[in-house]
Image (cartoon, rainbow, N blue to C red):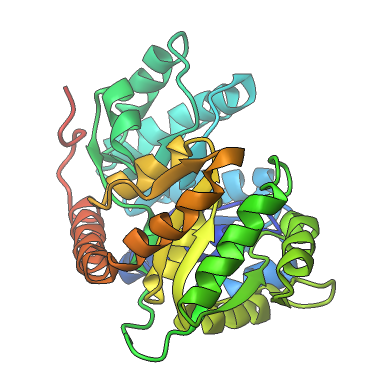
Amino acid sequence: MTTIFVLGSGQEDNIGDVVLRRTMFDQLRTRGPLHIFLGAASEEFVTALELSDSDVVYHDKGAWRSALWASIRRGRGTWFVDKPGELILGRRYLLAQLRMVPAAIAIRLQRGRVLRLGLGQRSPEPRLTPIYRALFRLSNVVAWRDADTYARFRLGEVMPDWGFAERGSTEVEGRNLLVLSYRSDKPAFTPALVAAIGDAARARGLDVVVVTQVGRDSPRSRELAEALDAELVDWPDGRSHGEQERLLRDVYRRSAIVLSDRLHVLIVAMTEGAVPLALSLGPNYKIGRHFDAIGYSDVSVPVSDGDADTVDAVITSALERGPEARRLLAAAVRRIDDVARDAMGAPTGVENGD
């Protein structure tokens, strides 16, 4: 029997981290029980992952590593799957990767699998990239979630972010909301830009709703809701991850368009049938790269203080892309399924590597 050891820790206050992990875990579980390291994740975070009774959760890295080596010593059937999401190439991460090298080699020698699926590099690190490229060559399959990261590493292939694979609403009718969700750690829109967004919504008969998908963004959500006199779906203390996600998906399911500078706000909203628009102060390269990976170009639209008069045209143009968004989302789901299937049955050696 295959036993799959997964690194899965994530940001506690981020629904997007729940979504992309849950999707990956569901794919992996078709091949065997999961042994998942989740670090300091709360009970609510773990519950939202909707794990199977056969899965084993570890909050202590040493205990997870000991179980991994015990499985390796028992013989064939052990896999290692690295954590999906954003790579920050620094000393701490490098040491963690180096510590996994003996286990990765042992697993490969036993004809098990070492998988790295759905990773993306935050920013270029030319000095460290060659080191990581050598380490990642120990994998059976490496799949990056954007083409820029693939180009830097020259190894593996490109797949859409795991979050795109969540099956949501395909309903077209009855969408009467314009939704906003913005980071609290970035400069805020000017009052003129906020007013222009509200005017654009009213001109189309859309009600404005502001939501919080990442807990630390709550202050910005409250500011926007007050400025727009809009309904607020905040994330108060005491509300579980699962309940917050349910409320968010209910809003996105009724949304014609969602504006955000958070990648997984736009991804989750798109899976629920809303048109994504990364309207932000300056270009959002991270969001652009990840939507380019599914063929949905120009999702990031930069605006400045003097662009209030153009906001209406930008929203009009985005709203016309509904059929395109639905078509490309369906293709992204198929691509993720193909990558997952190939990864779990791939021959030894990194596919598509130089």
Q: Which residue lies furthest to the bottom in this view?
A: 174
Viewed as shown, does residue 1 lie left or right of 354? right
Give the image quarter of residue 275.
Answer: bottom left
Quadrant of res 132: top left
- Give left or right: position of 5 versus 11: left
The location of residue 36, given as percent across then percent down, is 55, 58
Image quarter in which the C terminus is found: top left
Q: Which of 76 and 173 is in front in this view?
A: 173
Q: Classify residue 102 as left or right of residue 239.
A: left
The residue drawn where x is 43% and y is 11% is: 126
Residue furthest out toward the right: 237
334 relative to 161, above or below: below
Q: Residue furthest front?
A: 309
Q: Position of residue 91 (x, y in %)?
A: 61, 19
- What residue sits 41% from the left and 91% below the top? 174
Q: Which residue is drawn at 18% across and 28% down?
A: 353
Residue 293 x, y percent position in the rendering: 28, 46
At which x and y percent is residue 287? 44, 45
Q: Name the side, left or right, on which 331 lies relative to 16.
A: left
Q: How many marks?
A: 0
Residue 308 visible? The answer is yes
Q: Is residue 268 above or below residue 113?
A: below
Residue 82 visible? The answer is no
Q: In which quarter of the image is residue 300?
A: top left
Question: As rendered, which of 270 and 350 lies closer to the eye?
Answer: 270
